[in-house]
Image: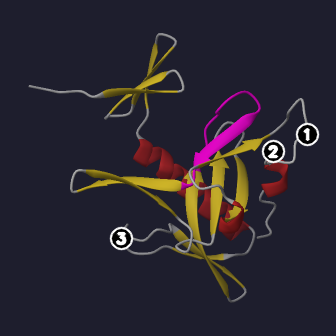
Amino acid sequence: MTIIVYFVVNDYIYNHQSIVISQGKVFTVNTKDKDDETEAKIIHALISHGYSVSIPIGDNDKYDIIVDDNGSLYRVQCKTAWTNKEGTMQFNTHTQITKERKYHENTHHGEVDAFLVRYPENEELCWIQIEEATEQKMELRFNAKINHPSINWAADYEFDGRI
């Protein structure tokens, strides 16, 4: 017997195997492959800008890479952003785990120094210091009809080779 659990997020239907059904079309999305691609592109960008990058052995650390900026070390969590609504990208700033049948959400404060976020739609990278990140999800805007102080502009975080 096979049991498939479906859940809905932002009008997309997902199952545990990350098959996305949207507007009648079926897409297979292997989240591990997508995250590996993001990490590889981020590492490539960092090395291209002259940084030394270290990768921890195993996957038990809260950070994905360590970036060496002339002796200053940064613990970095690599993230893949998605389109939340038109003109925005969004990414998770927390992890979710189930331990002993209890659901837990953990922020990365104190465990990483920054997020380096890739937006696959345009391959933009954004460097966000942990102190500037929100606690669950962070939305970055490309454009808006209003200019409100609470808006996080993607251009303000764009990775241009400087961290």
Residue hosting label 1: 147
> As shown in the figure, which amino acid type bears the numbered disc 2?
Ile
Q: Residues within 10 Å of mark 1 (few under 14, many from 20)?
A: few
Image quarter where the C terminus lies is: bottom right
Residue 19 in percent (x, y) is at 38, 28
Residue appearing at x 52%, y 73% in the figure: 111
Residue hosting label 3: 58
Residue 24 in percent (x, y) is at 47, 10
Please name whichever residue, 88 or 49, is drawn nearer the observer in this view of the structure: 88
Residue appearing at x 91%, y 39% in the figure: 147
Q: Residues within 10 Å of mark 3 (few under 14, many from 20)?
A: few
Closer to the N terminus: mark 3 or mark 1? 3
> As shown in the figure, which amino acid type bears the numbered disc 3?
Gly
The residue sitting at the left extreme is 1
Does residue 96 show up magenta in the picture?
Answer: no
Please name whichever residue, 148 or 68, is drawn nearer the observer in this view of the structure: 148
First to last magenta residue range:
80-93
Residue appearing at x 71%, y 53% in the figure: 125
Please name whichever residue, 39 or 11, is drawn nearer the observer in this view of the structure: 11
The residue sitting at the top extreme is 24
Q: Are marks 2 and 1 in contact (CB under 8 Å)?
A: yes
> As shown in the figure, which amino acid type bears the numbered disc 1?
Asn
Between marks 2 and 3 in the image, the one whose residue lies nearer the viewer: 2
Colour mode? secondary structure
Residue hosting label 2: 151
Image quarter where the N terminus lies is: top left
Please name whichever residue, 129 or 127, is drawn nearer the observer in this view of the structure: 129
Does residue 82 show up magenta in the picture?
Answer: yes
Residue appearing at x 87%, y 48% in the figure: 149
Dot 1: what SS? loop
Dot 2: what SS? loop
